Image (cartoon, grey):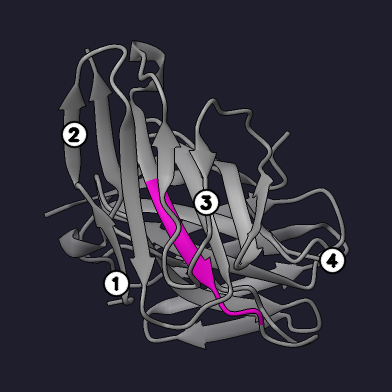
């Protein structure tokens, strides 16, 4: 099992609420990622970070925001949740490595978000 | 568009049979990785093959890579009901990120 944690595992919330999905890892990895995945579908990268104070948007546009104040922590925030945000959110991390790095990613268990 | 495309999208086999899943990609890669995802869980890394390798084994898993055809296959031998999961290929390249395919849903019937 990878040392990467996500809380909560399940969240059901009403429209308009602000939510923060937590992700933390104890592997000292520099790179961290957030993916959005609908049931049975592919993963879409929505945010990534290569280190503290570094955040970038991924391939899929998302209304969420992220922060990376500490190496081990990469929370995702939705200021005003909507039903269209209902999905599973997966956090992952990988080691920076050198030129030979394989970028193998270690995933958390995911947060299943339902917005009513 | 996704870099990797898995084929088939879904596969059902009997316990004990072999399962083969294929992955095609579009651009040059440094390595190709296969991940497994149980329903409602995160992905777990299974095996990695570098671009200068053609075949790799890990337990009941066998991965092949054909860079000329930009394709890879994952073979699971002597499948078990516990192998039921979604399997994703992911390509690593110069962008230093992984790009995941759309996945194959494998069901192993007891």
Q: Position of residue B44 (x, y in %)?
A: 38, 66
Mark 3 or 2, nearer chain start: 2
Dot 1 and dot 4 residues touching (CB under 8 Å): no
Depth check: give the residue in front, A32 or B28.
A32
Spatial CA distance of label 1 from label 4 is 36 Å
**Mark 4 against mark 2, which lies toward the viewer?**
2
**Mark 1 against mark 4, which lies toward the viewer?**
4
Q: Are marks 1 and 4 on the same chain?
A: yes
Residue occupying the point 73% across, 33% down: B1
Residue for badge 4 = B94
Q: Badge 1 local density, few (<14 within 10 Å), some, or many (20+)? A: some
The region drawn magenta spans: A90-96
The chain under label 4 reads B
Spatial CA distance of label 4 from label 2 is 36 Å
Which quarter of the picture shows residue A94? bottom right
State the quadrant of the N terminus of chain A. Answer: bottom left
């Amino acid at each position: 099992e990878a040392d990467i944690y996500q809380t909560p595992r399940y969240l059901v919330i009403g429209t308009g609420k602000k939510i923060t999905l937590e992700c933390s890892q104890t592997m000292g990895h520099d790179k961290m990622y957030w993916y959005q995945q609908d049931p049975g579908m592919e993963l879409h990268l929505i945010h990534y970070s290569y280190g503290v104070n570094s955040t970038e948007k991924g391939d899929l546009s998302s209304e969420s925001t992220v922060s990376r104040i500490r190496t081990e922590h990469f929370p995702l925030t939705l200021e005003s949740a909507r039903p269209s945000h209902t999905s599973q959110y997966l956090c992952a991390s990988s080691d920076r490595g050198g030129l030979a790095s394989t970028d193998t990613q270690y995933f958390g268990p995911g947060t299943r978000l339902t917005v009513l | 568009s996704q870099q990797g495309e898995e084929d088939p999208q879904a596969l059902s086999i009997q316990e004990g049979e072999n399962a083969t899943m294929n992955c095609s990609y579009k651009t040059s890669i440094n390595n190709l990785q296969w991940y497994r995802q149980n329903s409602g869980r995160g992905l777990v890394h299974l095996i990695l093959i570098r671009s200068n390798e053609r075949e790799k084994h890990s337990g009941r898993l066998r991965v092949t890579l054909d860079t000329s055809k930009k394709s890879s296959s994952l073979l699971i031998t002597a499948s078990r009901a516990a192998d039921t999961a979604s399997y994703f290929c992911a390509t690593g390249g110069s962008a230093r990120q992984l790009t995941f395919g759309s996945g194959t849903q494998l069901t192993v019937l007891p």
